[in-house]
Amino acid sequence: MALTKERIKEKLTEKFGEQLTDWQEPYGLLTCTAPKDFNLKVLQFLFDDDELQFRFLSDLQAVHYPDNAGAELAVVYHLHNLVDNIRLRLKVFTSVLQPDVYSATALYQSANFMERETYDFYGVNFVGHPNLKRILNVDEMDYFPMRKEFPLEDQTRIDKDDDMFGR
Amino acid sequence: MSEHITLPEGSIEKHTNTLNLGPTHPATHGVFQNILEMDGERIRKAESTVGYIHRAFEKIAERRPLYQITPLTDRLNYCSSPLNNMGWHLTCEKLLGIQIPKRVQYLRVIIMELARIADHLICNSIIGVDAGAYTGFLYVMQFRELIYEIWEEVCGSRLTTNIGRIGGFERNFTNTAFEKLEKFLHPKTGYPAQLAEFERLFTRNRIFMDRTIGCGAISAERALNYGFTGPNLRAAGVDYDVRVHEPYSGYQDFDFSVPVGKTGDCYDRYLVRNEEMWQSLKILNQAYEKVKEFKGAEAEVFHADSPAYYLPPKKDVYTKMEALIYHFKIIMGETEMPVGEVYNAIEAANGELGFYLISDGGRTPYRLHFRRPCFIYYQAYPELIKGSMLSDAIITMSSLNLIAGELDA
């Protein structure tokens, strides 16, 4: 029997009860939110369970919601069960002041670079990551550029004198 | 050599040397830095540094309306820009709920499969170049030129194509475009004949086999754990192909098979890519036949009916009120998107190219993330080359088809 979304939801609710919240299906992709201390437990369960078998981490990234006080940063995992060909999105919210989230590198080697990228742009501190340092930006950078408090430069500004680039 | 030479303790040969391979080494085809710890010719340890051409696409995209993001996707995997463009259009269409006519889907399949061939032929012939066989590269290169001519005919540009629009194409394919496609697909004088010639040069070549078999191998389990997708994963023996698993753009209407390898080494990656080119040719022939079946008014369909997102023809802008309004709104980026979050994946030349788009109902994405297959499988590179010779590391890198633009976003 192929795995269905209902069955995934049922199994996860059975295991974690009320911990997993905000079940949704935007554009047909099952989505749920886990408390931030639980992310690794949920991922481990999804990985180990013989029926669920979410053993492929497609994507991992963060989103910044500055208005969401106390849970400004969301870390989003896109998991894929390649046997039954079904995807799952797991979100973990954390505060921007103490953005500690457990690292998934022990389960998925592929999380290594993706978590470094997330740290680089959003400053999410992945606890247990073997080599958490900047990856795409320069090491000396002291801010996290993808956060919403850093807007892109106003293209119509006139105070900048830069003959080289014609502005 | 019959006699085994033992070196005295503390001899210079016993020490490892640090070698800086890159960032601008001519053999790495892009800006990659690897700090290698070498024991003679053997690699003991490698550390990769990436990010030399990071251009902050994700940040820039947060300020741009959807149609202005297409040129950013060009510059991810620039060997097959149309695939990225199409992936992006499909993501937008999924968010906006636009239904695409069959003919447009098949035209897109033609463009996408041409892009896949253009990408694979570069990758495979570059393995040859890195192994010291330049001829094959020149053999297939002239056919990439033919592919570029088709793109030029369809959209006007060659490398960074910005091909298509949300909802379809900017104009219908001309007869010249189809003639060029026919020329490319011709079994005697076109690409099939040249690909067969290319295979005769390489596939059973003793030197090539000795250089690539067993080089940079990875098991299926490790490859999955490292997040491999595309030809590199299939070479390890996992038949995961987004075109089959989650068909998009009408791929379910085509008859093609998914080649898989066994050992996941450079030779298998080469074989899988070669076979995929044959499969792409098969799809191209089918798609062209299907496109030819549309007659009369149906043969004029080249975009979906979605006036709010698809630019109206210039003639209508000057004569019709409604077209003028839509034209203005689209150009000024004043069209609001529905609220939602979409993850859409396509099978790009290197694997699963995913777009994670969050819209808060504004005019620009709230958040856009590109899942770049290169970036994810590149982290396996130190493991792949550990214990191998330096020259094998170079071949492994070219057979993984690392594209710096895709790696660094």
Image: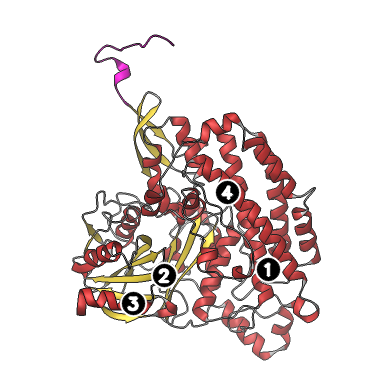
Report the span colored magenta. B1-16
Badge 3 and badge 2 both on one subunit: yes
Q: Secondary structure at mark 3?
A: helix
Query: Which residue is tagged 2?
Result: A86
User: From what the image shows, is residue B13 above or below residue A67?
Assistant: above
Q: Amino acid at mark 2?
A: Ile
For the residues labelled 4 and 3, the Cα–Cα distance comes to 37 Å
Q: Residues within 10 Å of mark 4 (few under 14, many from 20)?
A: many
Task: Identify the chain of the residue marked 1, using the numbered disc in the image.
Answer: B
Badge 4 and badge 1 both on one subunit: yes
Image location (x, y in percent) of residue B99: 59, 80
The stretch drawn in magenta includes residue B195: no
For the residues labelled 2 and 1, the Cα–Cα distance comes to 28 Å
Front-most of residues B321 and A37:
A37
Image location (x, y in percent) of residue B117: 63, 53
- Which label sits in the foreground, 2 or 1? 2
Q: Secondary structure at mark 4?
A: helix
- Which label sits in the foreground, 4 or 3? 3
Q: Give the position of the N terminus of chain B as an image quadrant.
A: top left
Q: Residues within 10 Å of mark 3 (few under 14, many from 20)?
A: few
- Which label sits in the foreground, 4 or 1? 4
For the residues labelled 2 and 4, the Cα–Cα distance comes to 26 Å
Q: Which mark is residue A7?
A: 3
